[in-house]
Image: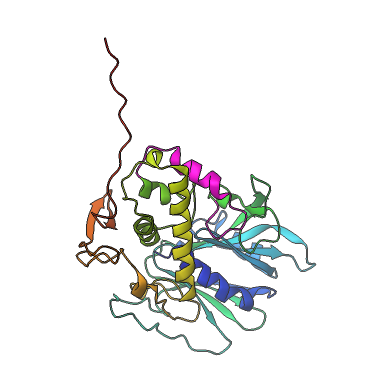
Amino acid sequence: MPELPEVEVVRRGLAPRTVGRTVAEVELLDARIIRRQAGGADRLRAALAGTTLTALVRRGKFLWWRLADPDGADTGEALMGHLGMSGQLRVRASGEAPALAPAPASAGPASDPLRHRRLSLHLDDGTRIDLIDQRLFGGLWTSELVDAADGRTAALGSPDALLPAEAAHIGRDLLDPALDLPAAARALRARRAGIKSLLLNQQLVSGIGNIYADEALWAARVRYDTPGEVLSQRKALQLLREARTVMERALEVGGTSFDALYVNVDGRSGYFARSLSAYGREGEPCPRCGTPLRRVVSMNRSSHFCPRCQRRRTPAVAPSPVR
């Protein structure tokens, strides 16, 4: 599943080719891709026809375009997108034939740009934005704009504090300049759940998925099942900073591609899989101490860790009162 770095790669690829352009036509090939759209296809077409895309914004794994009417006034809605497990947003210039993405060495079947194309936005300069989704967990839909609860700029790429109502419950992410990092660390420490499940909780800090959670935990020497309440503020801050660092490094090389389901807007794969320290490396020596890395499955999710560098910590048990 694309995580924050992969979605940010897509945003950076789409922004210069879509912002300032007008939607000329919405071509819907599979109505399942707009299942979240209130009012269905007719409502989506009515909301987008003739509107101009004025900004492309990302919070966590959610993307949205701000919309303006033909007179330049904000419509009060955004066009939201989520890539789900296998979604791709691919750009095609006018007359350009779709190309099958080259697959990484470990890849499974790639999405077919013809068979798995579910929706296309045709822009006024002839550019076409294709939403390709093999597994159909992603989608596009419109959402009313509301004020961010903290009154700060809504997200990366946003011109103001407005964000789609359906993204209002999503926490800020680690690349968001408006994130209050100490407050995010305190939120992790206020929970008894295992720290990995807290990192994956999109309402606390958004954008982190399985890959970057494992990498951040390895870098901070914290085991996946350590209760959040056990961490000191200093350790929680270190963990979040490690997560931000690893995602910034992934951004530099286009994200992580373990299969051909994630590609950028030009159909190219990212190369951060070559730089991973823990995720997907079960049985290999820990880059730090040489101990074989382990993989465990908990709640249908794999966690990769070093049993020596990342030891479990539990809350201290208060002594029983003397009777």
Q: Position of residue 213 (x, y in %)?
A: 38, 57
- Residue 268, position as x, y percentages in the image: 44, 81
Magenta stretch: includes residue 164: no
- Residue 246 location (% of width, % of height): 44, 64
Which of the 4 image quarters holds residue 280? bottom left
Name the residue at 22% across, 58% down: 294
Q: Nearer the viewer, residue 49 or 201?
A: 201
In the image, residue 202 above or below residue 91: above
Q: Could you tell me which residue is drawn at 33 percent across and 44 percent down?
A: 226
What secondary structure is the magenta-colored segment mainly? loop
Is 274 located above or below residue 75 in the figure?
A: below
Left or right of 144, for residue 222: left
Residue 57 percent location from the top left of the image:
61, 63
Tell which of 238 and 273 is nearer to you: 238
Residue 268 visible from this viewpoint = yes
Total of numbered circles in the picture? 0
Residue 24 in view in this figure: no
Q: Residue at x 26, y 62 (%)?
A: 289
Name the residue located 52 percent from the left edge and 68 percent from the top edge.
Answer: 8
Please, which residue is most extreme toward the top here?
Answer: 323
Is 165 positioned to the left or the right of 101 in the image?
Answer: right
Q: As rendered, which of 113 and 82 lies closer to the eye?
A: 82
| Residue 176 falls within the magenta-colored stretch | yes
Q: Nearer the viewer, residue 36 or 299?
A: 299
Dividing the image into 4 quarters, which one contains the N terminus? bottom left
Question: Bounds of the magenta span?
Answer: 172-194
Quarter the C terminus occupies: top left
Residue 14 in the figure: left or right of residue 225: right
Please say which color scheme the image uses. Answer: rainbow
